[in-house]
Amino acid sequence: MFSVEIGGILTTLIFLYETFVPAGGSVFFVGMVSAWLWLTVLFSNFAESLAEGRGKARAASLRRSRATMTANKIESQSLSAPVTTVASPDLRCGDLVLVRTGDLIPSDGEVIAGAALVNEAAITGESAPVVREAGGDRSAVTGGTTVIANEIIVRITAEPGKTFLDCMIQMIEGATRRKTPNEIALEILLFALTGIFLLVVATIWPVSAYSAAVSGSGSPVHVAVLVALFVCLAPTTIAALLPAIGIAGMDRLFQRNIIAMSGRAIEAAGDVNILLLDKTGTITLGNRQAVAFIPVDGMADEDLVTAAYCASYDDETPEGKSIISLACASGCPTTCPPEHAVFIPFSAQTRMSGMDIGGTTYRKGATDAITNEVTSAGREVPPDLVSKVTRIAQTGGTPLVVSKDHSVIGVIHLKDILKSGVRERFFDLRRMGIRTVMITGDNPLTAAAIAAEAGVDDFLAETKPDDKLRLIKEYQDEGYMVAMTGDGTNDAPALAQADVAVAMNNGTQPAREAANIIDLDSDPTKLIDVVEIGKQILMTRGALTTFSIANDVAKYFAIIPAAFLVIYPQLAVLNIMGLATPESAIISAVIFNALIIPLLIPLALRGVQFRPMPAARLFTYNLVIFGLGGIVAPFLGIKGIDILISAVMPL
Amino acid sequence: MPAANPVFDVTLFILFLIIVTGAAVLAGRYLAAVFSGSLTWAPFSRIEHALFRLVGTSPEQEESWQGYARDLLIFNALGFLILFLILLLQGILPLNPQQVPGFSLIDALNIAVSFVTNTNWQVYSGEASANYFTQVLGLTVQNFLSAATGICVAIAVMRGHTRKMTDRIGNFWVDMTRAVLYVLLPLACIAALILLSQGVIQNFDPSLKTTGYGGTGSQTIAMGPVASQEAIKELGTNGGGFFNANSAHPYENPTSFSNLFEIFLILLIPAALPFTFGIISGQKRQGWALYAVMMMLFVASLGTMYASELSGNPSRALQDVPGVSMEGKEVRFGLSGTALFSTSTTATACGAVNAMHDSLTPLGGLVPMFLILLGEVVFGGVGSGFATMIAFVIVAVFIAGLMIGRTPEYLAKKVEIFEMKMALIAILIPGILVLVFVGIGVVIEGGLLGIFNPGPHGLSEIVYAFASMANNNGSAFAGLNAALPFYTLSGAVVMVIGRYVPAIAMLALAGTMARKKTIPPGPGTLPTASPSFVLWLIAVILIIGALTFFPLFAMGPIAEHFALAGGL
């Protein structure tokens, strides 16, 4: 764009000069060229500011909340320690602050004492408050969020200016948007093309002077024409839209509540060829649901339904609720009066839950837990239990054995329910050349069944925390780019190792620090969105570059015959578009060159539509649209503008 | 006059190109075997090891790209010095029956640079001003070594793209020795014998004095060791003729068969290198894809030239004169033999000629100019053409890779900032040289003085001259007094930069590519052997190579064509 500005200045000077010192040429023509060059610059700036504008408003509101924050600094980890009030930018890593009900959390940190209900709407836009408590995986708090109940002590973990809020503001405003390697390489290409075209145009002047001298007619090509030719040939279209594409890509992520800590991470997402996905929450709904009651031999269906119902009556877990609703599918059992019942909650020791009513005990639990219960009471385990349990496990389900009065009645088939649409998404990913690997703590049998149902390419069962890290390293050594999501502290090493690491916003601070992308909605399937947007950014750049370069063919055919016509009249044959006059031809090309920028702004902001298809087909498809289209469009465009111009203007 | 018979000629072209393709496939395999070190032959390997001991190296001691480039430059600098001295001192050296004096300093500089850089642009007339010592031990030796240098670069580039996680791209001395010993020497010997059988001369006799044709006084017929130089001249895409008339001279190229054979030699190694690449990379389709790109551009060029010459001079004034334009062509080769030769010699960086390119019709003459300005990638110079083609592939892959939403990769290696820079340097440097020096040439007096045919044709002559030197082709459009100091000196500069800057850039590219990890290919990988990619690569080559020079073409050959056609 800088080169266009130089061109604009140059033509303006010539225009002014020729206005006062008539040189015989058309002053109006020079003026037109100059005006449209300035418009080209304007359109280019417009593209960039339009892209930035969308994020600006949100950044401003974030900035406001940051400015007003103060912190209650305390010296010791005690809720009653003496408080000193400091401004939040003065907080250093390791400082302790007390946050009371209604306070803004002054900076990023970790809850080290207490538990509180926190409204994170300022960051996530989600109004439902979340619990943040000391210890465990929910201890991270973000500066700028509000405590709406209880008080907590927070240890600050971010230096001033490096907080999540700061990062967000900077990312949204594009202030720290460092150029990605792809972007730099593309700029080098564009720079080289600009340079060579500058040289081409510079050579035209002496060559045309020579030609004019020897042909005895005409004069060296007018500088305004040379500037026009240069601006048309140089890849101004893509150069004008390049910043907008990157910013708009960030913005698209942001609209989906994803914060990328660097543009590099988004582009890396486009290159990912392995997705490591946790089963729970990503592939399946978080919870298993009961789908069948299978009584052991000699037991009646109704007995099992009743026992399962009673054992789950006060069970508030999603599994328990799903058992109730399955049992009530054909009318709730009535033999289980809630009065006088004693609810036995699940405990790590017994690994069972259930209910005692009168003298009757109802229990449900994992196979070995119930088997223990039954055998320790001196009862026999029914011989067909093992086969029934195994059959459920083989189909990817989880068997839950139900007992009544210490004897086995039957098995509840709990099943992982796939999130809707994941299968199709994995299919699309496979067509794009991305392998999905499911990570689960389940046993291999169950994992295999779910993997097959979900259509993932591979799975890793019975994983321990460090398995993820090992797996990522293995894949990376083979040359793959790996993406993963995580939320827990034990995910942090793997997140740090992955090429694209998406942390859930409700995850722990170490996880969030290790990741390069943070999903504010804490939705693990967002990873797939990130991949698509990453690809879109690259595709948009590639497509517009192709379009921009392909445009040169038509521009040459518009300008070259026009520029040399006075020297070699026979070159009129090259005017294959039949443009009216040399002046209108050149101006039409310049106008087309300027107008194509605002016309392509929507595409640059929206991104080239992503189609999940193999690279070979996608390439051919885009090549036809942007390559062939890039050759044809300017022929039509320039001709059209020429018809308009020659009709209304005295050229 | 052998009237052109299009049906016969086209059949000939097709058959010829099929034979070339077949031979190139075989030669490609042979080259792959030689440079992977899997092919050894006891007598050669004894010579080889003696030479390695002399230099103090061994095939196991591979070099980084910097080391490879350094050795290449040292070796070429030595070659230059020796040739430069021979040229200066040839007056006192043996094998000088005609008693020709030494060259002037400027001419010696130009010639030495020209032969070391595989350009073989000739400011001198072979038979008149170079003695046999110079021809055999000076020029012919460099014909071998400069061609071998090109092959070394190509092989190093291939290694760079096919190795992973290493910074070693081979040993220059080993590659150089093998290129000469296993490839160029044996092939040149066979070729020389075949040429001898057709009547190419090989002797150290003084020139013959005979009675002139039609009793016009006495005539001098130049003699010399022609066959030995002729073979490597074509095989190594050198192109510097023993005689001034180059391959139009009956002692260099006596028969239609020798003509076809010479064209075959010109194309053989450049056409074989894509196949070598296919084998070394383990993906033969990649080799075929590059070959397809080259062949399609070649066929289009050949067709244009043939059609343009077939329809004769476009001038209205000559419309009554029927038939093919035969000015400047040898009758014994006819139109087909000339069109095929001219296309091949400029598609590769050979530059030998069997006709006066100056006398081609304007559009026919545009073809050689166009081919040279594309950067000599249609088969290209021995080695250097392949390397430049890879540079074009890198740029094409980059844009294409973005279009499918991936960081671009070629042969499972990512194309990043450094590779982009190097590829662009390799592609654009020759073009920049042409533009700059043409611009200077049409302005300063020293440049304008050399133009014998002012007007669009004069411009074509200057453009052609610098294009030929910057791309190390060496053929001339003639009609330009290239012996003027301006052309001699600027030519030397252009040839050196045009040869070594791209070569070093490509070695650097090979070096960084070799260091990279490979990414296992999958359905998300851009297929670089597909028809779409082949077409895309052609488009990139045409847009970067051709669009850059469109204004020059317009004011040169195109203006001339329409001037003639329009009767202006």
Image: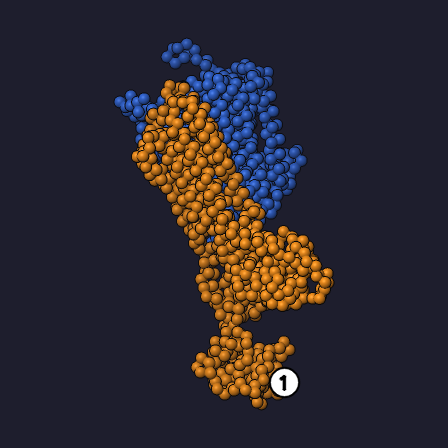
Chain colours: A orange, B blue
Q: Is residue A464 above or below residue B208?
A: below
Name which quarter of the figure residue B257 lies in: top left
The residue carrying mark 1 is A376
Q: Quadrant of the C terminus of chain A?
A: top left
In the displayed image of the protein, which residue is found farthest to the top? Answer: B217
Along the viewing direction, whichever of A88 and B191 lies nearer the viewer: A88
- Few, some or many residues within 10 Å of mark 1 (<14, 14–19, 20+): few
Along the viewing direction, whichever of B342 and B456 lies nearer the viewer: B456
Q: Secondary structure at mark 1?
A: helix
> Which residue lies at the image location 61% right of the left edge and 60% below the top edge?
A104
Along the viewing direction, whichever of B292 and B47 lies nearer the viewer: B292
**Count of picture labels:** 1
> Which residue lies at the image location 61% right of the left edge and 85% below the top edge?
A375
Q: Is residue A66 above or below residue B73?
A: below
> Which residue lies at the image location 64% right of the left edge and 39% below the top edge?
B58
Q: Is residue A433 above or below residue B357?
A: below
Q: Is residue A44 visible?
A: yes
Q: Position of residue A254 (x, y in %)?
A: 51, 55
**What chain does mark 1 sit on?**
A
Give the residue type that dot 1 points to.
Answer: Ser
